[in-house]
Image: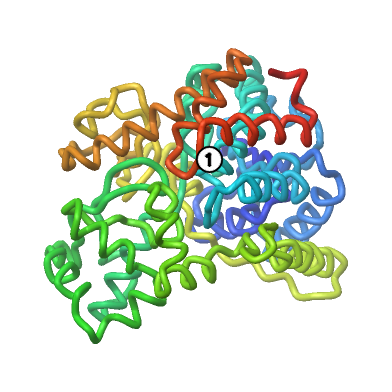
Amino acid sequence: MNSPKILIIGAGSHFTLGLFGDLFRVNDLWGSELVLMDIDEERLNVITKIIQRTVKSRKVDLKINATTNLDEALENADFVILTIRSGGLEALKEIIEIPLRLGSVEVVGDTVGPSGVLKGVLEIPVIVDIARKIRDVAPNALVLNFTNPMTPICEAVEKSANIRTVGLCHGIHQIRRLASKILKLPHDERLEADAAGINHFTWTVDIKYEDESIYNEVLNNLFLEKNEEILVEHPYLIGRDLYKTFGLPPTLSDRHTSEFFHYLYDWINDPKRGPILKKVSGYIDYEKKTLLKEAVEKEERRMQRLTCMAERRKEIKVVPSGEYAMDIISAMTHGRKMELLAANVMNKESVEGVPLEYFVEVPVQVNQQGLSPIKKFRLPRAIVSMLNSHLNKFQLLVDGILEKEKNLIVQAIALDPLTPSPEKAEKIFNLFSERLSLQNYF
């Protein structure tokens, strides 16, 4: 497999140009076929023109095909990258606003909280249909998923289609970036972090620079007054509080970490932490309890910029994303072993106390057969308890969708720490089903 067929489903997303840029970074997948698939023909045409022009101008050997037909796209695919967002901005508006107006709090709403569950309700059925087609048309393909909520989507693909799946996220780099700022070190491959947990909720057990541990030095520096501005900017004030209580520092910034706790109700009203969380949200107008106007405008500007590139009215800029997808494809294509700091894979005893079949985010090794965990973690009991609580909630969500059982989904919403009450959980789901016309599905 020296010239693989790489398929991007949801090619109109913001991931695609960066992933295309990663082909230049790894620089050993030339001769491959890149297939761009999206149900939005206009977006697909724009991104295809940009990539075709770049391939021609840089004179690289890469075959480009584009289609709105999934079966056609999947034929003989070796790697399938999922970057879809179902329903577009209109669906995102409902995902964000319904829980807010029924009393929930949130910051991002793409993984946990009632909004994270609703996003799963929207994304998982579509991805399950795709996964079953992959099983039937390209059963040996590796699925590389970027769509959130990451953990239940990976669980649903595994349960429904039993095909090879990995979830990819760049969250591990947030603690590396914080360490580099605090200790004034280069943020490059010499700086490594060792972390485990679930997507957007991992905990760091070591940080190394040039193979020497700097972990204790980083932790001690969290409490020095000279670093307070760095922690506010990152932000990592909540991360520091959680480290004091639970004994390990969270890997991600407060933007994601905060949503896994019912403490968010206090944090969002805290005079110091609250304004920081609201500022870094990027999605929520907290006064109006709506999707932030700037979030819509940002997407509109992105499409305008891409359209200008496609129509030769603007210079094409292709910048590598730094995501691991093309690194994995390169290693598997050329039969090369590689270790990655983080990927979402089935547990297989990697995190003690978490069921073996659940998906966790841990360091992995890549070889020609796929990806597997390379370390075993014994995390504090309280942290394992929190991980399992969210994982069990995700199981209810996945089973509710696969079995078309509304009550299981309502229970998943009710179990989330950001849901105000069981009654509100049912109201949130019913209103969402009505607005998105999902009543006939469940």
**How is the protein colored in the picture?**
rainbow
Q: Residues within 10 Å of mark 1 (few under 14, many from 20)?
A: many
In the rendered view, tell whether residue 385 sits above or below residue 71.
below
Q: Is residue 155 visible?
A: yes
Q: Is residue 2 visible?
A: no
In the rendered view, tell whether residue 319 sits above or below residue 42.
below
Q: Residue at x 20, y 61 (%)?
A: 207
Q: Could you tell whether 33 is left or right of 26 in the image?
A: right
Q: Nearer the viewer, residue 193 or 416?
A: 416
Residue situated furthest bottom in the rendering: 226
Which quarter of the picture shows residue 328? Answer: top left
Please name the amino acid that badge 1 sits on: Pro
Q: Which residue is mark 1?
A: 149
Residue 323 in the image: x percent, y percent?
Answer: 48, 54
Q: Could you tell whether 113 is left or right of 307 in the image?
A: left
In the rendered view, tell whether residue 104 sits above or below residue 357.
below
Q: Residue at x 37, y 62 (%)?
A: 174
Residue 273 in the image: x percent, y percent?
Answer: 41, 69
Residue 30 in the image: x percent, y percent?
Answer: 58, 50
Residue 296 in the image: x percent, y percent?
Answer: 74, 62
Q: Could you tell whether 189 is left or right of 83 in the image?
A: left
Numbered disc total: 1
Q: Could you tell whether 103 is left or right of 325 in the image?
A: right
Element at badge 1? loop
In the rendered view, tell whether residue 36 sits above or below residue 269.
above
Question: Which quarter of the rendering shows the C terminus?
Answer: top right
Q: Residue at x 44, y 32 (%)?
A: 415
Q: Residue at x 77, y 31 (%)?
A: 434
